[in-house]
Amino acid sequence: MTPEQLTGQSDSHLKPTLIGTKTFMVHSEVREDLKHLIEAAQLAGFKMEIVSGFRDYERQTLIWNRKFSGEVPILDLESQPLDASTLSEHQKLSAILRWSALPGASRHHWGCDFDVFARNQLPEGTQLQLEPWEYLTGHQQAFYQWLATHADQFGFFFPYSQDLGGVAVEPWHISHRKVSQSCLSQLSPTLLGKQLQSKPILGYKVIMERLDDIYTRFVANISQ
């Protein structure tokens, strides 16, 4: 993978892939495993769909900047909005990183990570929130339990299945183990620093002060 591919600047390693009625950019080595997983889910009674797949650096920056500027609420671990005006820049940084990846460091840049749900388990008139309760005790529970049991058979795992003090629990987020491990092994604080230097984001100064800690706690710190 090139630095541009790793940090969301290029999608040359991805191929357009029809999933259901939508086309997603998917890593070439992941496409068949993903299709087989979706087919198995269908046979088990779940209409598995992707909420979010590949996101480039610009898209991740938009999400980041809207949160850092206060345009979009920053949530606590109970999915409740925090009062950003009471937070220092360091506190704001940590709070955002619990739910949103640093641009350049998002696993969604790689084309091997996906936020998924079962369309036919979503109650009519209900909008998916991507909150843990939906998958652990709510309408996506049966699908999540099936996925947790069978994802590994197709090469996928849950990088945020446990709260390790970094990214919050995300039971909707699956990752292709082989491809994502290769990508993560090539990413580094130095590479991220160069990316951010060339295309700064809000909070750039405090991010650079804490870049090694951010990488250790929020990028490399995943459930195996």
Image (tube, rainbow, N blue to C red):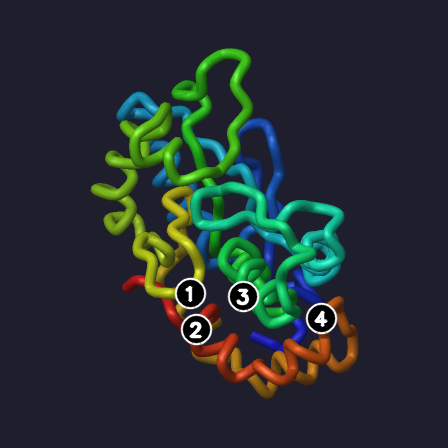
Outermost residue on the left side: it is 149
Q: Which mark, by number, is residue 94? A: 3
Q: Which residue is mark 1?
A: 166
Q: Residue at x 48, y 44 (%)?
A: 115
**C-alpha gap between disc 1 and disc 3:** 9 Å
**C-alpha gap between disc 1 and disc 2:** 5 Å
Of 198 and 76, the residue lying toward us: 76
Name which quarter of the figure residue 109 lies in. Answer: bottom right
Of 147 and 69, the residue lying toward us: 69
Q: Amino acid at mark 1?
A: Gly
Q: Residue at x 37, y 44 (%)?
A: 171
Q: Which residue is mark 2?
A: 217
Q: Which mark, by number, is residue 126? A: none
Figure quadrant of the C terminus: bottom left
Q: Residue at x 42, y 19 (%)?
A: 120
Q: Nearer the viewer, mark 4 or mark 2?
A: 4
- Say what secondary structure mark 4 lies in: loop
Q: Which residue is mark 4?
A: 203
Q: Amino acid at mark 3?
A: Ser
Q: Amino acid at mark 2?
A: Arg
CB contact under 8 Å: marks 3 and 2? no
Figure quadrant of the N terminus: bottom right
